[in-house]
């Protein structure tokens, strides 16, 4: 019989909002606002009793939609002029 039991850290944990805020560099208030977006845009979460949990991998996938490169105003102007990369 082992003297002690060692449990490995789960690589894809469920995080309460406070821990997710620390992981993401966002405030709990901002995360709550993302939870209240329309269903197709909202941060996916699990509501267990009064606790809100977010799986780290699901947060990573959700936040990827906000990835940006370069200057957003310039990209928007190029798109409006039909000069963006997709149309060339």
Image (cartoon, rainbow, N blue to C red):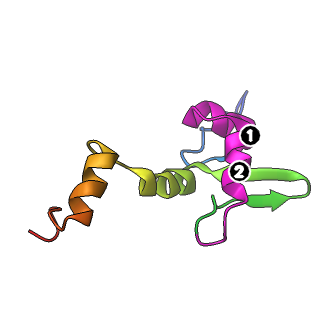
Determine the residue positioned at 72% across, 38% down.
28
The residue that label 2 is drawn on is: 33
Quadrant location of the N terminus?
top right
Is 69 located above or below residue 61 in the figure? Answer: above
Residue 35 seen in the figure: yes
Determine the residue positioned at 59% across, 72% down.
40
Determine the residue positioned at 14% across, 63% down.
83
- Relative horizontal placement of residue 28, taking residue 82 as reference (left or right): right
Within the magenta stretch, is there residue 37?
yes
Label 1 crowd bin: few (<14), some (14–19), many (20+), radius 10 Å: few
x and y percentages locating residue 52 in the rendered image: 79, 52
In magenta, the rendered stretch is 15-40
Residue 7 seen in the figure: no
**Magenta: predominant secondary structure element?**
helix
- Relative horizontal placement of residue 10, taking residue 86 as reference (left or right): right
Label 2 crowd bin: few (<14), some (14–19), many (20+), radius 10 Å: few
Quadrant location of the C terminus?
bottom left
x and y percentages locating residue 48 in the rendered image: 85, 58
Q: Are marks 1 and 2 in contact (CB under 8 Å)?
A: yes
* Mark 1–mark 2 distance (CA, rounded to whole Å): 6 Å
Within the magenta stretch, is there residue 82?
no
Secondary element under disc 1, as helix, strand or loop, is helix
The residue that label 1 is drawn on is: 29
Tally of numbered tags: 2
Determine the residue positioned at 58% across, 66% down.
41
Is 56 located above or below residue 49 in the figure? Answer: above
């Amino acid at each position: 019989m082992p003297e002690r039991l060692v449990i490995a850290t789960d690589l894809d944990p469920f995080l309460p909002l406070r821990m997710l805020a620390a992981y993401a560099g966002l405030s709990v208030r901002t995360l709550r606002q993302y939870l209240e977006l329309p269903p197709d845009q909202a941060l996916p979460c699990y509501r267990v009793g009064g606790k809100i949990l977010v799986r780290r991998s699901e947060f990573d996938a959700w936040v990827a939609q906000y990835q940006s490169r370069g200057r957003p105003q310039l990209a928007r102007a190029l798109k409006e002029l039909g000069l963006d990369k997709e149309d060339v």
